[in-house]
Amino acid sequence: MPFTLKEDVITKYALLWEDWKCREIPDDTPEHVREYANMFTVDSGSNCLSSTLFAVTKQDWIIKEWVHPETFINTIERAGYSLTTERIRNGDLITWENDKNVVQHATYYIGNDLYFNKNGQTFFNPWKIVNSSELNEQWRHYKKKVYRKQ
């Protein structure tokens, strides 16, 4: 197969997973988050939970891992995060949980209605900056919770 045909097939397949639309990276985005924002990974595995933990811990190794929901909750609690009912602010973590309180998605709030986010665990799913309407639309069937470092 010619290279251009291979490229076209892979691109069209990848777009079935993700639309790749992202927001501009705000100037005040933490530097460690800025390094990965609106970028693709070269390996499958990284999920929303590992991406959110990376934003919190600044540990590069974790952004490339797959993280289990229970591990995610244990790690954010050890990092000093707990549930809050106050209005969201920079540095907060947002989760969407099912009826059994199992985290289905997580993201890191960077401010101005923008989040550092990763949908899925394939290399077709980039780490990107998205807004709340995109997240709320996609995860509206779950309970939204906000965690803040105390």
Image (cartoon, helix red, strand yellow):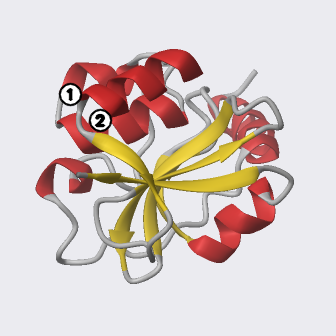
Disc 1: which residue:
60
| Residue positioned 62% across, 43% down in the render | 119
Looking at the rendered structure, the secondary structure element under dot 2 is helix
Left or right? Give the position of 13 relative to 61. right
Residue 114 in percent (x, y) is at 44, 73
> In the rendered view, does 16 fall on the left or right side of 61?
right
* Residue farthest bottom in this picture: 112
Q: Position of residue 110 (x, y in %)?
A: 33, 67
Q: Amino acid under label 1? A: Asp
On the rendered structure, is 146 left or right of 96?
left
Disc 1 crowd rating (10 Å Cα; few below 14, some 14-19, many 20+) is some
The answer to whether 101 is drawn above or below residue 82 in the figure is above
Q: Amino acid at mark 2?
A: Phe
Q: Nearer the viewer, residue 42 or 116?
A: 116
Q: Is residue 19 placed above or below 52 in the rendered structure?
A: below
Residue 63 picture location, percent across and down: 34, 28
Position in image of residue 101 (x %, y %)? 70, 33
> Which of the two discs, 2 and 1, labels the residue nearer the N terminus?
2
Visible in this render: residue 68?
no
Q: Residue furthest left?
A: 31
Quadrant location, the N terminus: top right
Relative to 42, is 90 above or below?
below
Which disc is residue 18 wearing? none
Residue under pointer 2: 54
Residue at 23%, 33% in the rendered image = 79
State the residue at coordinates (72%, 39%).
14
Secondary structure at numbered mark 1: helix
Q: Are marks 2 and 1 in contact (CB under 8 Å)?
A: yes
Name the quadrant containing residue 120. top right
| Left or right, residue 55 beside residue 9 | left
